Amino acid sequence: MTRLLPVQDSSSFLSTTTIIALTVFFTLLCACIVIGHLLEENRWANESITSLLLGLISGVVVLLVTKFHSSKILVFSENLFFLYLLPPIIFNAGFQVKKKQFFQNFTTILLFGVFGSMISFCLISLAVGAILSATDSVCTLQVLSQDDTPFLYSIVFGEGVVNDATSIVLFNAVQSLDLGSINAITALKLLGTFLYLFFTSTALGITVGFLSAYIIKTLYFGRHSTDREVALMMLMAYCSYMVAELLNLSGILTIFFCGIVMSHYTWHNVTESSRVTTKHSFATISFIAETFIFLYVGMDALDIDKWKSSNASLGTSIAVSSTLFALVLIGRAAFVFPISNCTNCIKRRESTQIQFRSQFIIWWAGLMRGAVTIALTYNQFSKSDTTTEDGALMITSTIIVVLFSTVVFGSITKPLIEAVKLKHAKPAISDETDSPSFEDLRLLFLENGDPNDQGNNQRGPWQSSFRLLISNPTSTVHYFWRKFDDKFMRPVFGGRGFVPFVPGSPSGAADEIS
């Protein structure tokens, strides 16, 4: 929860301190929105950098007003971040993600998110490695465009989601790890813990998504109140996150996959007006949470108490921060380029391979560190209200890394993409692959024999299907999933094609006019 600094004793229900803090933050949020709109066309700036810099400026003002005694309006809280700010951001990302692009690159995402985090973790060293291995998926939403660079967006953001979960697993494991008895069994236990966390968290999110789709399709709330539809979707999504945290699973993975399932099934079961409302409501809540996070981090960075507690000189702080960031650079390069080249060896089509310039952008865009890193740092190095000198030094050094990586790498990413990607050149990655479309593959199956069709193909339907699976694995899996989805899943859980009719709704009015 948020802890407000007691400026004065007050027995009133709404203290002056609370009102001042909320007023300042709401005013700053409005300022961030206005400034962000004015800088919309500026390729060097984005919402996250604007919010971060505005938070820093506000922190300086508070320092001056309090005569360098305090810059705190709100104290950074892990509960505030993990329970209230992060869930709507990750859910909306899953709800809005281009599912075909995401799952097309799912193997690469897992390799980067899991093995990449572990490689980075080993290079940067144990607990600190787990903290600094957490790529900022929130900042990725700001600097990469899902429409302009769908491949890069799906890889870097998808990696960030899996990466955050991996980092938290590693972080928790290190807390109880005996450094003197690390062996192969310990490594296998760690891997088993992650696999358990990943699959159970994903299954929970998918289950809640299916449950919401079934309930809304069966009970059809829209015939009485579209508000109930919207409320149920929001509450069930948030409930999936809370249940995951209650079971010590990854709430990030759970709510992300819950968002994917809800967008594929639940969203198509509600009325047209509810679709418009949910789409914009989720996006708005996510946007406010993102802006608040960066504003919050910016103001908290100037907490004078932390800097005093570290009792370190400017040179020492810069040296420690530089060392940490250098390890981040090396740790990320150690897995991005090798894993990319390994996947290129497997992919036979040149158009589906990850070219070096794309590898460079993936490496660069993933260097940003944000609120997840700061939250884990507080958890590790801050005990209650007391912090040792070394702990304070690690916290302040991590804050410097976060500020530098977000501002510098965040501002340069967009121009770098335009320069490296050669915007008007033909894409050399799987943004536009030459893989056959669903309709083309359907025709291929009809020619070679579909397992679901009765024919007299001499080669045999399953033999033909296996041959096509080897030559076009992604498209073939997508083909069979579409057939399974249309035949079994959508009749039960709804989805595309299920259009509820409500008198007075936009679709209903249109039908009456026609």
Image (spheres, rainbow, N blue to C red):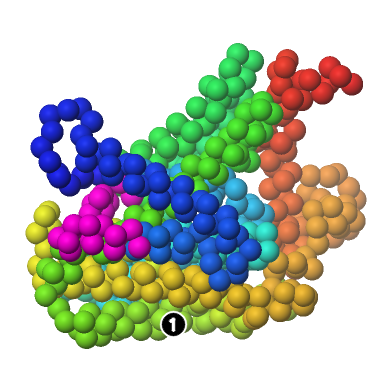
What's the residue at 72%, 49% (across, down)? 480
**Of residues 200 and 109, the one drawn nearer to the viewer in this rendering:** 109
Q: In which image quadrant can residue 500 be found?
A: top right
Residue marked by disc 1: 334
Q: Is residue 346 visible?
A: no
What's the residue at 29%, 68% (across, down)? 399
Q: Is residue 500 visible?
A: yes
188 is higher (above) or lower (below) than 219 = below
314 is higher (above) or lower (below) than 208 = below
Going by the numbered disc 1, the residue's amino acid type is: Ala
Locate residue 362 relative to residue 509 in the image: left or right.
left
What's the residue at 13%, 58% (across, down)? 383
**Of residues 394 and 223, the one drawn nearer to the viewer in this rendering:** 394
Dot 1, how many residues are within 10 Å of its Cα: few (below 14), some (14-19), or many (20+)? some
- Does 463 lie within the magenta span? no
What's the residue at 72%, 17% (across, down)? 504
Q: Secondary structure at mark 1?
A: helix
In the rendered image, residue 284, in percent from the top left (x then y), is placed at 53, 42
514 is higher (above) or lower (below) than 413 = above
In the rendered image, residue 17, in percent from the top left (x then y), is placed at 22, 41
Q: Magenta span covers which residues?
A: 57-83
In the rendered image, residue 93, in percent from the top left (x then y), is placed at 54, 50
Locate residue 273 relative to residue 51 in the image: left or right.
right
Quadrant assignment for the C terminus: top right
